[in-house]
Amino acid sequence: MKIKIKIKTLILALLLISLTFVWGIPTATLSIAYLLENKSDKATLFFERYASYPTTSKVKGGYLYADSLLRNFPKYSIFLTGWGGGDNTSPEDVEKVKNTLAGIMNEAPKSSETVYYIDSYRMLLDLAIDVGDAEMLKEWISFGQNSSEEKIVYIADIYNAFYLHVSRDREGAKKIIAKYEGSELADVNLDILRAEIELFDGNYEKSKRLYNEFNNGSNYWPRTESVFGSMGYLDRSFWFDYIMDDFIGDNIITGTVTFEGKPMPFVEIYVQKADGGMHSRGESYIGITDENGEFETLGLRDGLYNIGIGLDSSLLSDKVLQRSNHQYTELAGNGGKVDFTFRKTFGVTLPEPGQTVNGEEFTVSWEEVEGAAYYTVEPIITDEPYKKSGTSFRSPASDKNGKGKFAENYAVFNIEMLRNQFIIRFGGDGTSIEPLTVLGAFLPGAEYPIVVNAYDDENKLITSSIPMRSYYDSIPSVIVEGKLTKGEEMILGRDYTNAIAHYENMLNSNPDDVEALKYLARIYGTGWRMEEGNIEKAYEYGKRYGDLTGDNKMLIGTFNIMSKDEIKENIEIVRLAIEQARDDIWEDEYYFLSRYYIVLRDYEAAREVLDKRDSVTDTLIYLNMYFGDYAKAAENLQSKNYYLSRLASDKIINAVRALDENHPAAGDRQVFDDFLLKLIYGVHYEKGQSLYYETVKQIEDDNIKTILYEIYLDNHWSRSY
């Protein structure tokens, strides 16, 4: 049977097919990409499909794809008090953007594509700044200066002016600005650069006025929110009003940012108050590194500061920050120096990612690091281990011999010992204890990433096996073979009532069942303040477990999370537990032991046990001052093992030394000692402010007043909650 088709119908069908191919499919693809742009990571996939379609313009399609991969260049902030923010951009995506944009520059754009061509060029320059590639920036500036497109030449010149400004050749930058002022080409980039030069010339008020002028509508922002490879300029007006006005002074901080000794250009330098935390909002920089990795900041007033840096997250995929300075930056009229040194990560040879542990032990081995005095091994533990999500923490693990520091480049771990070591009181749901507080870590079937750190002989971190930005699925990890028992499943489901009944029935059948003894001890011990708690039973079951296994780590670990008030209420049982576990108390339990002695008011014993720890705590410093050993307290404050604190400032150290040279009068000493004892036991922040004011009004000694005020600030008692 023959089918007759009219010529007109055939032509119409072919036309429809052509339109669908040429216009319909790419238009639909782009529409989906725009729809998903702010909702899903899959938007990039549709932009990529649109860009690769045969009929799509390479200029427009390439730009939209590149922009979807890397937009606005938000910075990842790094302070000693914490770090975070920015998009999790991968080095692979950065390379894709670089190649895509470079390819666009080889095109001859149509008039309708000019705006995408110009935006692509600007994005290339922004990318060079964002990833700290000074040679790339200079190469593309030269390319633009030789262009026949007037707008491209202008952009090249303005970015060259930015480069000169960063290189502290502000006079050279000003000449370029003068060339374009008042011209039709002038845009917000020129305004920002002019304001930045005024700022770093010390003309704060003029810079502030310029920012307010164009932020109030006298000029326009480009189609992206980034300028000169950063979003920091958007917040300058806010930053002037609410941040920098409190900091303006004469102290200039200098320093470097390097990676394995090589400079890192265009890294932004930030400042925050030394208040013990890190602000989560974006930062406006007070300095930026040149191509030699060197920087000079704006002038800051005398005080204590938290200095940080901002850079693209893709740069952190193979880097670790060497935290050689654990103190805030203190300025007192003569400026300061701060260096940020990054080191390359080193490899862990065992385990491999997702390695299954079949027996009771597993080995961790790693590459040797030059200059390392010892290594620590830290599992990453989350409160939802089967989902690999939730709250997480890292803590050094002890090997099967109880060691936590390793001179060799390997260590062997016993799974049961690790499960007994990591007993952490997570938040819970308000009515019951958190399941992992009972179950511990290294549950069967759950994956635990492993991190190795290398330290020098001054206990300073040299480098680590994990970079500052990484994906857990690429980290060496172990999965313990097996599955949860029936009782463990009950605990994981928070069914503690039935779990208790289940394990007590097991003990009725076998009084020496170690699983039942362990979990009953933990349920009663860690949850004793809840409905199921019973500290006497916890001790009874824990002691029997220790007698049977020879491992008292579980018992002392269960009691280790007790507060001082909990210890006080159960002092006799805690004493018996400590006696039972005396030979199994490792360094990580010393702080618990000190709390026990503080409750007994045996402050000398508490000081002695805290002095055995590698790390220096506030409590040890307070105890040394309480005993009048001010020289030792000053030594503690200067220790590299003392955590980040504003108490480590020269102001406090000098005040403590002054007390050593000239001990306070008896009245002041008594009031100060009473205050220190309250600190040693623990002061809730709601009562801290009144305690401070009650104490300071009774003190005449200026050095003690200085110490009291810094403790007041360090404990955030000045805040209203």
Image: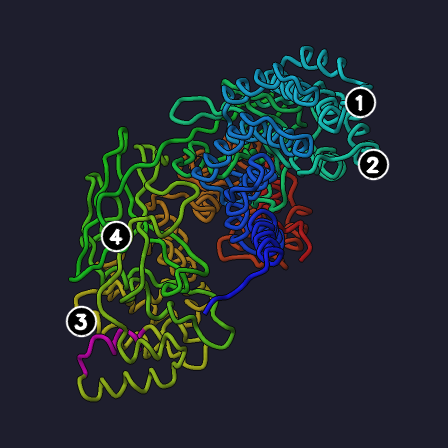
The residue that disc 1 covers is 184
In-image side of 68 versus 149 (left or right): left
Is residue 109 positioned above or below 541 on the image? above
Residue positioned 66% across, 27% down in the render = 300
Q: Give the amino acid at mark 1.
A: Glu
Q: Which residues are magenta?
A: 511-521
In-image side of 558 versus 693 (left or right): left
Q: Dot 1, crowdedness within 10 Å: few (<14), some or many (≥20)?
A: few
Q: Which mark is residue 547?
A: 3
Q: Which mark is residue 217?
A: 2
Identify the image quadrant of the C terminus.
bottom right
Q: Earlier in the sequence, mark 3 or mark 4?
A: 4
Q: Earlier in the sequence, mark 1 or mark 2?
A: 1
Helix, strand, or loop for circle 2? Answer: helix
The residue that disc 4 covers is 398
Q: Earlier in the sequence, mark 4 or mark 2?
A: 2
Is residue 609 positioned above or below 526 on the image? above
